[in-house]
Amino acid sequence: MQIIDLTIDDKKSIQKVAGLLMAGFTEAWNDIEEALSEVEESLPKDRISRIAVEKDGTVVGWIAGQSNYRGNVWELHPLVVDESCRGKGIGRALVADFEACVKSRGGITIYLGTDDETNSTSLYGKDLYPDVLGKVMNMTNRNRHPYGFYKKLGYEVVGVLPDANGFGKPDIFMAKRVQASEESL
């Protein structure tokens, strides 16, 4: 497997990535046109859009992101791996590659949102007000929610947006510093 840039002229890979999005995020995109639009939005040179491909050219994963805060912070969105290839280190490799790309562009921090729309954390179905942060501090993973994957890679929960996807369906925000602080330089 290798990780390469996804480019505007690679129509076959763009189609495959859109299909991965539809299969991996059943709640997010309603049709293939919406998924294709999401992929195409990741392709300008000021963004990062990388695919994991097998030796035969088969696309098995995709990661993308864009910069914010004058390039200091990058949003990782989205990450998807073909269901038949999960658990083989492809997601971990894509995240490591994304972190290296962000670092090479001078980025300091990466953040992401990881929704709970499927009762996968103890936050699901709950009224998080009052004391939102107290509930976040006691959050548990019920059903292999992706925040567990990101925690293993050094990302920390930095907040939550209650009801982002409807009552009791929060978006969980995570972040990781990828560049040494100026004091340690």
Image (cartoon, rainbow, N blue to C red):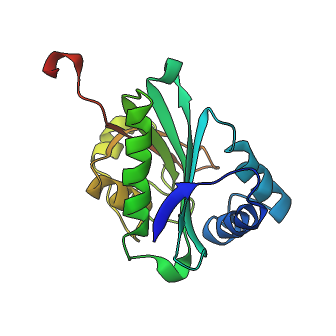
Work out which quarter of the rendered image holds the N terminus and state it: bottom left
Name the residue at 31% across, 36% down: 178
Residue name at image x 75 percent, y 48 percent: 40
Q: Is residue 26 left or right of residue 5?
A: right
Q: Position of residue 150 (x, y in %)?
A: 36, 54
Q: x, y (%) of residue 160?
A: 45, 40
Q: Position of residue 56 (x, y in %)?
A: 58, 80
Residue with the most extreme bottom position = 84
Q: Quadrant of residue 59?
A: bottom right
Of 172 and 51, which appears nearest the observer? Answer: 51
The one of 115 and 155 positioned closer to us in this rendering: 155
Can the viewer see residue 182?
A: yes
Whether residue 121 is visible:
no
Left or right, 94 with respect to 64, comes to left
The number of numbered discs placed on residues in the rendered structure image is 0
Identify the residue shown where x is 79% and y is 50%: 37
Q: Is residue 163 left or right of residue 28?
A: left
Front-most of 32 and 103? 103
Quadrant where the C terminus is found in the figure = top left
Task: Using the image, determine if residue 133 lies above or below residue 70.
Answer: below
Furthest toward the left, the residue is 184
* Residue depicted at 56% across the width and 74% down the height: 82
